[in-house]
Amino acid sequence: MGMCLFIASETAFFFSFFWAFFHGSLAPSVDIGSIWPPEGIISLDPWGLPLVNTIILLSSGVTITWSHRAILSSNRKEMTNSLIATILYGALFSGIQYYEYTVAPFSINDSIFGSLFFLLTGFHGCHILIGSIFLIICLFRHFKYHFTSTHHVGFEAAIWYWHFVDVVWLFLFVIVYIWGG
């Protein structure tokens, strides 16, 4: 129940920033030229690195589900391999996100667009990092035989969190990269 409430609070957290993004984009102020994205901002191509990151994150959702199915069928080797694959996908996603930040043609100081872009994607990146740590801890617990096919609540909580992060990214990709850019 605690994890469900935590995910609900995180949903409200992201909802507030999406609300700010919608407010800024649907009713752009005169200060930014009454257009969205603001004048002088060149948004990122959503069909480049953001699409690659979307595919990576959706793939990680598949591997974490595979890992869950493996533990339910007591297949330790498949659980280990798919959990490691999920962690590697998370690391790859973070590396590509970092690279995207270094090549972005705008910064966090570039009006409300830059601020909200880096705020939304940065907080999502922090959630990827936290989820990856959560999964690494689950991997170590798996190595120590803490999980069985009938007792793995901590691992299920990590799975819920990872899927939450996946869903948030889908909203980010569609709203911030495709629609808002």
Image: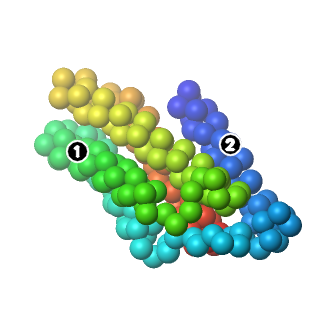
In the image: residue 155, left or right of residue 125: left
Q: Can you name the residue that lies furthest to the left here? A: 77
Q: Which amino acid does label 2 sit on?
A: Ala
* Residue 2 visible, this angle: yes
Seen at 45% across and 66% down, the residue is 50
- 71 w.r.t. 107: above or below: above
Q: Name the residue under label 1.
A: 84
- 149 w.r.t. 91: above or below: above
Residue 120 or residue 171, whichever sits in front: 120
- 110 w.r.t. 150: above or below: below
Seen at 25% across and 33% down, the residue is 139
Q: How far apart are marks 1 and 2 (CA)?
A: 30 Å
Seen at 25% across and 40% down, the residue is 71
Q: What element carries label 2?
A: helix
Quarter holding the N terminus is top right
Badge count: 2
Q: Choose top left, top right, bottom left or bottom right for residue 155.
A: top left
Q: Can you name the residue that lies furthest to the right here? A: 30
Point out residue 102 in the picture as x, y percentages from the top left corner: 43, 57
* Residue 8 visible, this angle: no
Q: How crowded is mark 1: few (under 14 residues within 10 Å), some or many (20 or more)?
A: some
Q: Name the residue under label 2.
A: 12
Sequence order check: which comes first, mark 1 or mark 2? 2
Q: How crowded is mark 2: few (under 14 residues within 10 Å), some or many (20 or more)?
A: few
